[in-house]
Structure formats: C-alpha cells, structure tokens
Amino acid sequence: MSASDFPRPLVMGVETSCDETSVAVLDGENRIRGHVILSQDEHQVFGGVVPELAARAHLQKIDSVVDGALKEAGVGLRDIDLFGVTAGPGLIGALLVGVCWAKAAAAAGGRPVVGVHHMEAHLFAASLEDASAEPPFVGLLVSGGHTLLLHAEAWGDYTLLGQTRDDAAGEAFDKVAKLLGLPYPGGPEIQRAAESGDPGRHSLPRPMLRGDQRPGDPDYYDFSFSGLKTAVLTCVQGLEEEGRLPKERDHVAAAFQEAAVDTLASKTLRAVEETGCRRVLLGGGVSANAPLRREVAERLGPDGRLFTASPRLSVDNGAMVARTARFRFDRGEVAPPTLTASARLAFPGLSAPAA
Ligand code: KG4
Ligand code: ZN
C-alpha cells in the first residue's frame, strides 16, 4: 500500500514536551502508519530530567525521528496533510523545539498546524487502540508533571474534579525511586522492585484520603503526594542508620506503591459513584502501572468499563498528539502563524464543576 492509498488526511504528530522525542503518522482512520518514540537517556546520570539537556537532545534528534516515522509509514513529508504539535504544558525549551519544527514544516508545505495540549492528548491515547475508549468517562490523568481527575462528558467538554496540590503522582514515583537508589524514570523501577516486596512491612500514610470526607469537601477529590514522599524519606533514613535499607528496599517500594495506588483508585471510584458514570479512562505515564490498573478494574467491578492504553502509548508519544490535532482541526481549530509554546498551557474545555 502506498501513501496515495491511505485514507486521508494524513496527520503528523510531534511530541517534545519532556524527555521523549516522538513523531507519528496517522491515516484518515486514525490508524498508526509510522511511529518513533525516542527516550532520552542523557538524564539517567542526573536522576531526573535536565531541561536544557532535554531541549538540546530534541534539537539533535528531531530530524532523524521524523525520518524514521515517515519511513515506517512509507510516505514523504509532502504527503502530510496536517501537522499537530504539543504546545504545552511542559519544559519550555523542549516544547519550543517541536513547535518550531512543526511550524516550519507546515509553512514549507503550505499545510495547517494545530497546537495540542499534552494532557488532552493523554486522554486520546487509549482510543487509538480501542475505538470505544471515548466519553463519557471519568478520566484519571497521572504523569510526571500532572495528576488530574476529571469527568469527560464529550471530547473537548471536561469537568475538573480534583488535582494534586503539590507533587504529581509520577514525580512521587521518581523521587521515591531516587531515595531507594533506583534509576530514573522511577515508576517502572518501583513497580519491578515492589513485585518482590511485602507492602505490609512498612506503614505509610494515604495523603488526603480519609473516610470522613464528603462530596463537596475541598479535599474530597484532590491529591497530595509530598507528605507520602517525606514519610518514605523518614522511613529510608531510619533503615539506613540501622544498615537495613538494602534488605528492606523492595518492601518500602511495595508499601509506597500500595499507598499511591490506593489513593488514586479511591478518589477515582469516588468520582464514579458521584457522577454515576461507570466508564473510567486512565492516561499518562503512571497509568502504565499494572497494580493501578488492576486495583481500579477490581473496584469498578464487572459492570464497569476500564479503558487504558498499552504501556507504549501510555507514556509520551506522537500518536496521541496527532489524534488530538485531528479532533481539534475537525472542530475548525488551526493555529495562527504566531503559535508559540507555553509551559503552563490551559487545558482546553476543562471547567470547574458548577457550584
Ligand atoms: O506521561 P509521561 O510519559 O510524561 C509526562 O507527561 O510527564 O509520564 C512519565 C511518568 C514518570 O514519572 C514515570 O516514572 C511514570 O510516568 N511511569 C510509571 C510507570 N511507567 C512510567 N509510574 C508507575 N508505574 C509505571 N509502570
Ligand atoms: Zn505525558
């Protein structure tokens, strides 16, 4: 099959908001024709993402990542009908690389470009693999920079229920991994270590989760992970003093993961009960966490539906950006030539609940 046989329009999605350089080509039926996700390993030695290094690495790699995606799709840049690019939120230097690249490519080919909100793109990821993963649903978005609980009544129409007041869920996994001497990114490392740990050996708090909270309370849906991280720090310091950290490491990882998963799943299920919507979608890098998926599925029960993307599409990727760009384009949204990146871009269509 050649490019001329693909259903049109062909959309290229460009993602450079953090430490993945990723580009995808979607055909007119939202099938992924080419997709490259390059994770930067420059940051490993620093135990976290170094913003300037990330921007430089995107700049060095973006052309070869684009070439790889085009080659896999068997199309040329001239065949692309629409460009979508993450315009925020994220690291500003990193975002600017993708935005500049997409604007230049679109201008050179006389094609439109659409700026995409990174967290809205995470909402679209599961629909690339399962067409029924569409609103209405309760959405839990958990990534390295954000933790958002929302009710999606339709694409583009979202009610914010809760968010983190301090650290994001992924940030907590990464920081706890660092405390335990595990490499970055910490989420998959914690999950692996926890498999051989007993979560009951160390007792950790469930931040902002209490039985006496009621709908309407300001903390009913909100999250807080920095207290949990501090509790892990205190626990780790105690174990280090006693020289027991190496033996206890996996148990601490398991206890942390259980506390984080319990909090995320409990608040998600509160939203299910209050909205009456038994369809739940998990998005963002932390949604790759197998115990989180299991816990939410179990609590949701057989009459609920749980939508998740495969681990590859749960983390940052260009395909979800292309999919979101198509949605926005179909609604008549095209970026002006002045399109820029914003580290704190507002989530489009996300409103606070009616009082
Ligand atoms: O969505 P994402 O790829 O990038 C951002 O938008 O931030 O999410 C990255 C986050 C990291 O904090 C990483 O540790 C976490 O997702 N993560 C996981 C797992 N895989 C990735 N957290 C828990 N369990 C996992 N299996
Ligand atoms: Zn992300």
Image (cartoon, grey):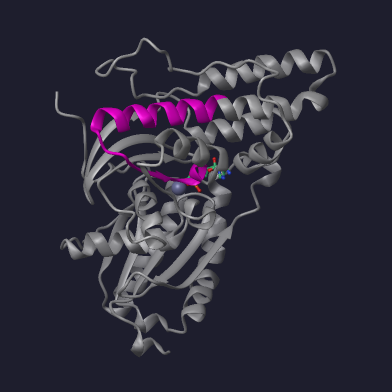
Q: Nearer the viewer, residue 297 or 246?
A: 297
Q: Residue furthest top?
A: 212
Residue 195 in the image: state x and y as whole percent: 69, 37
Give the residue displayed 47% in from the left and 41% down from the top.
143
Q: Is residue 329 within the magenta segment?
A: no
Q: Position of residue 10 (x, y in %)?
A: 33, 76
**The C terminus - image quarter:** top left
Compared with residue 348, is residue 229 higher up or lower down, i.e. above or below? above
Q: Is residue 135 left or right of residue 280?
A: left
Q: Position of residue 130 (x, y in %)?
A: 38, 60
Give above or below for 197 relative to 16: above
Residue extending farthest to the front is 302
Q: Is residue 163 visible?
A: no
Q: Is residue 281 magenta?
A: yes
Number of marks drawn: 0
Q: Which stretch did the figure color magenta? A: 259-287
The residue under the point 28% across, 79% down is 8
Question: Closer to the camera, 237 or 248?
Answer: 248
Q: Quadrant of the N terminus?
A: bottom left
Residue at far right of view = 243
**Residue 164, relative to residue 25: is it above or below?**
above
Query: Magenta stretch mostly in which secondary structure?
Result: helix
Q: Is residue 101 left or right of residue 186?
A: left
Residue 60's quadrant in the figure?
A: bottom right
Q: Is residue 55 visible?
A: yes
Q: Position of residue 92 (x, y in %)?
A: 42, 47
In the displayed structure image, the side of residue 163 where residue 186 appears, left or right: right
